[in-house]
Every structure is written in structure tokens, then in C-alpha cells.
Image (tube, helix red, strand yellow):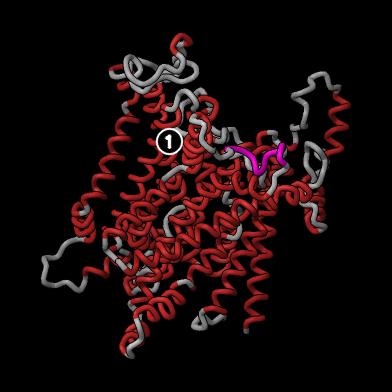
Amino acid sequence: MLAKYVARRFLASLVVVLGVTLITLVLMDRTRGTYVPGIDLNPALRPEDIARLRADLGLDRPFYVWYLTWIWGVVHGDFGRSMIDGSTVMSHILDRLPNTLELTGTAILIGIIIAIPVGVIGALRHGSKADHTLTVVSVAGFAVPQFWMGLILILIFSVTLEQHGLPWLPSSGAYSAHNGGDFIDRIEHLILPATVLSFFYMSTWSRFIRSSMLEVLSQDYIRTARAKGMSERRVVYLHGLRNALIPLVTLIGLELPGLVSGGLVVEVVFGWPGIGKLAFERALQYDYTTVMGVTFFATMLVIAGNLLADLLYGVLDPRIRYS
Amino acid sequence: MIGPSRVAELDMPGAAIEGSSTRPAQSYWNESWERLRANRIGMAAGILILIFALIAILAPVFSAVLTHFQPQTIDLSQTFSPPGGKHLLGTDELGRDTLTRLIWGARVTLGVALLTVAVSLTVGTAVGMTAGYYGGWLDDVLMRLVDTVLAIPAIFLFILMSILFRPTPISLALIIASVGWGQVARLVRGEVLSVKQRDFILATRSIGARHLRLMLRHLLPNVLPVLIVAASLGVGQIILIEAALDFLGLGIQPPTPSWGNQLTNAESYFFHSIWLVNFPGLLIFVTVLASNVFGNAIRDAFDPRLK
């Protein structure tokens, strides 16, 4: 039963993957006829040079050849070649991936660690002052533009502290060049961007845990547990929280692609050398193939994350049956 | 981006009032309006947005009467003047009046948000209703298309499209809506699937109503509450996305002022001119906050069981 379900889901995912390649390629096909990278830098190029450049990049080939070539590259794991430096997109991704995972992984972890107690307190003291305060904070977390929050944090913790001769936090990059980026140095660079990013996750997930916990606590089995004289702590944490966290698994599974794409704006603001910043920089240079390769890579993660979350959900909650 | 997906699982909101026979009969819309009016914070947020919208519409009047500057008037003798005096909220690196640019920026921000919502709702409703109503292979094809669009991380898709299509307010709205419609389509399809089963649809069909009439006259009004909720919850997200794209330089291009692109160069100036960072950011924050609070109020009023 499960195997059949997995197979069907896998096939459906494959259709989506093919659809994604078509959409991105059709979008890109709109421009590839005219664009030659570097042409704006050197207006003295002769027409035959331009033709040669275009041929090198494969821009003169018909659409289906181009598409199939790209697919061939994806199957072999290179995700296409950059229009600017000719290296494979995969090499760029692998180059930046550790930095991105460091940032988003930390932020997601901090987000979960803060969100669970915040959500539980909100549910247990439902309607209290603490609940209201936490609600206001998380509502604000949904509304604050990440780039603005980043700028303000840089202003306070990098600029102002430095001006007053106090210890300050670096505002840009993942490590500093002069002391080789040791552990402490990396942590210092991580603090500000991770704070901005985790604030968003914290807001989302704490609301979610709060309502999930409220729902679980009104279930019959909680009443039964209380009726048989179980201590309130055991009721809340053993029966309540454990069940309330199940839907969170789905949510975090859905956030898996966020590991790569979720931090784009934060990466740009803090000059964090990650995948999001790569896509952004290459977009400004009109390096379509790189942007497309990265987009496709991130899309693969979405599809994998959805599938994984679906399956995990069934493992954790036996009431769910695959059909 | 638009609306929580759990809305889709719910049945008709109208069912909630059927049981209460002690009160005088009231229409669903009246009932909802009463509930909305009773929500003071929600109403305050709604009125704030209305005021912002009025300011945006009347921007030429404001810049003539209140600020006495045009958004693109450059005055190099007045660069970085602090708030107060002739420039109420100070000036930027080209001596342009911040307040004037914020007022004109409201046109862009709110206009793009409005257009995005309108396009997402129209396309999403059409697709979702077609898929849900006809079912079968048409449903499969349309929903796989929705899956595909929604599988691509939105921010990458926005970046890709904004380098392919020169962003103007209209094309930017279309770019953001190119993801939004998928979420609406899913929502509407789920709703249509449940409403379709009800007896009055069978009755309407049995007296020979055509498909189009059935969809527009009978299904659409029943889907409307879900759409209203989705639209009002989506506005805040759209404003944030639009502001982020503008900030990144991938959205509305200077010299046209928008709230987001006024922050693009902020990092170079905020050492000495903090107001250039504070005011646009605060404005985005307050507007999104008000939209979200109002959206929640709308949801509570139109779909009380979701509260």
C-alpha cells in the first residue's frame, strides 16, 4: 500500500519536475535570441565575433535542442553552464551551499527552539497577558520587512556600537579575511542575519504550535488522561505536546526548500555569500542559465521536501492512511 | 501568499446561521458586517488602510498643497537635510523631499498590491472553478499546472521574471500574480468540490441551467466568502514581496518612487541620515501590519468558525 502510494506520488512529482523545466526554459527562450553576455562591455565586436559567441553559448540552436541539452546536463548533475564564466552551475551551487545551510539551518533551529515554548505558553495561558504579548510580537514578525529589520540591526549593532567604542558585530559576509574565519569569527558574523531570519520562523511556528496545542488539549484523550489522575505536567508534555508537534513536522518539511531559498533577502542585506545572493548577483548580470539552474535546484528541494513531509506525517500519525 | 490553505476544507459559511432561530433572520452579508464592525482593532486597521489609499489617490493634491514639492524635483543644495522645516521628513541624496516621495510611493505600492490581488483572484477563480466543476482530465491538467507553478520557490521565479520582463508597476503586479493565482485556484477548487455536491446545484441543473450560468450565478456567490478572506489576508504578503523586490532593485526602477526602492541605497547613507531608513521601512511595516490585522478581522467576520 505504502509502496504504491510512494510510487504514485513519485510519478506525480516527476510530471511537476518536467513542467518546471518547461516553464523556466520557455521564459528564458524569450530573451536568448538577442542576448550575448559582455556585448555591452565591448561595442567594437564584429558581427562574426558575436555569431561565434552565440554559437559557443548554444544560442543559435533551435529551442528543442537547447532544451534537450539542458535536460541532459541536469541528468548528469551539472544543472547547465553559466553564461558568464562557462563553469557548471552545480559547481557554483556546491560552492555556496555550505554558507547558505549554515545561515538558514541556524535560523530554523533557533526558530524551532524559541517557537515551541512560546507556542506552548500561549496555549496553556490562553487569553492571559503573556499570551497577548506573544501574539503581538508574532503578528509583528509577519509584518516587518526583513531587509528593513536587517538594516536597523546593522545600524544598532554594527555602526552605533562601533561609534561608541563598544564591542560590535560584523555587518557583512560570513567570515573575515584577516583572521581566517575561525569558529568564533563565523559565529559573530552569523548572529545578525540569523536573528532576522529566525524572527520570521519563530513568528510563524509559534502561532502554529499555539493553535495546534489548543486543539490537542481539547481532545478526548487529554480528558481521559486527566481523569485517570495523571499529573498536569505529564498530560501537557507527554500527551499534549507530543501530539501537537506532529503537524509541525509537515510545516518544517515544507520549509526544507527554505533552507536554500528562504534567506535570499537576508543574504543580500548582510552580504552573506550564499545561494540566494548568487542567484541575485547573477540575475543583475543577466546570467540566465545560472539563475535558472539555481531555481531548478531549489525547486527539486521543494518537491523532495513535500514528499518527505507527506511520508513522515504518516509515520508519526498512524491515523493517516495512504490510499 | 494568498490565504491559508485550510480555508479550503471548510463548508459553506452560511450554514453557521441556519441554527439560530431566536434572532430575526439576517442575511449572511449583514451578519458578517455586524461582526466586522464589532471588531474595533480590525476596523481601526481597515480605516488606516483606507486613509493610506486616499492619500495615494490624492497624491498630486498633497504634493501641491502640503509638501510643495514634486517627487522627482532634484535640489542639490538641499541634500540630506534632516526632518523639519521646509522638508517635513527630510531629503535624500539628491535633495528630493522624502514625504513627497513616500506619498507618491504609496500609489505604486498600493496600486501594485491591488492589481496583483485582482489578477490573482480573477485567474485563480476561473481556473479553480473550471477544474472543480468539470473534474476529470481537465481537473488533472489544470491542477498539475498549479502544482508546477507553486513548486518553484516564488522568490527565484520573481527574480527570473523581473530580469526577463522590464518591471513597470503593471508587469510587476503580473509577475507577483503569476504565483498568487495558483493558490487561489487551489482554494476555489476545494470550495467548488464541496458546494457542487449540494442539492440546490442538482435542482438548478435539473431545470436545465447551462454550465456557465451554474458557475457564475450559483457557484461563484458561494465561493465569494472564501475569496474575500483570501484576498484580504494576501494583501500584506504582496506588499512585503513588492517592497523586497523594489529594495533588491528588481522591481520598480528609480526615479519612480516606491517604498521599497527608497531603501535600496539606504546602507550608504544611514550613518548620517537615519530618516531615510526609518520612514519608508516604518511605513511598509505599519501598512502590512494593518493589512494583516484587517485581514484577520475579515476572516473572523466572514468565516466565524475559523476563529
* Three-letter amino acid code at the position of disc 1: Gly
- Image quarter in which the C terminus of chain B is found: bottom left
Q: Residues within 10 Å of mark 1 (few under 14, many from 20)?
A: many
Residue A257 among those drawn in magenta: no
Q: Residue visible at 49% across and 73% down?
A: A246
In this picture, is A45 found above or below B182?
A: above
Judged from this view, the residue extending furthest toward the bottom is: A228
Residue B255 x, y percent position in the rendering: 51, 22
Relative to residue A154, is residue A40 drawn left or right? Answer: right
Q: Camera-side residue: B266 or B45?
A: B266
In this picture, is B18 found above or below A48?
A: below
Q: Camera-side residue: A308 or A73?
A: A308
Q: Which residues are magenta?
A: A171-179
Indicate the secondary structure of the residue bearing disc 1: helix
Q: Camera-side residue: B43 or A245?
A: A245
Relative to residue B210, is residue B168 drawn left or right? Answer: right
Q: Residue visible at 36% across and 86% down?
A: A230
Q: Residue visible at 35% across and 69% down?
A: B11
Q: Residue A130: tell me if it is visible.
A: yes
In this picture, is A60 found above or below A303?
A: above
Residue B49 x, y percent position in the rendering: 31, 40
Residue A92 x, y percent position in the rendering: 75, 46
Q: Residue visible at 45% across and 61% down?
A: A115
Number of labels in the image equals 1
State which chain disc 1 sits on. B
Residue under numbered circle 1: B281
Q: Residue A67: tell me if it is visible.
A: no
Residue B196 x, y percent position in the rendering: 40, 70
Relative to residue A254, is residue B221 drawn left or right? Answer: left
Which image quadrant for residue A29?
top right
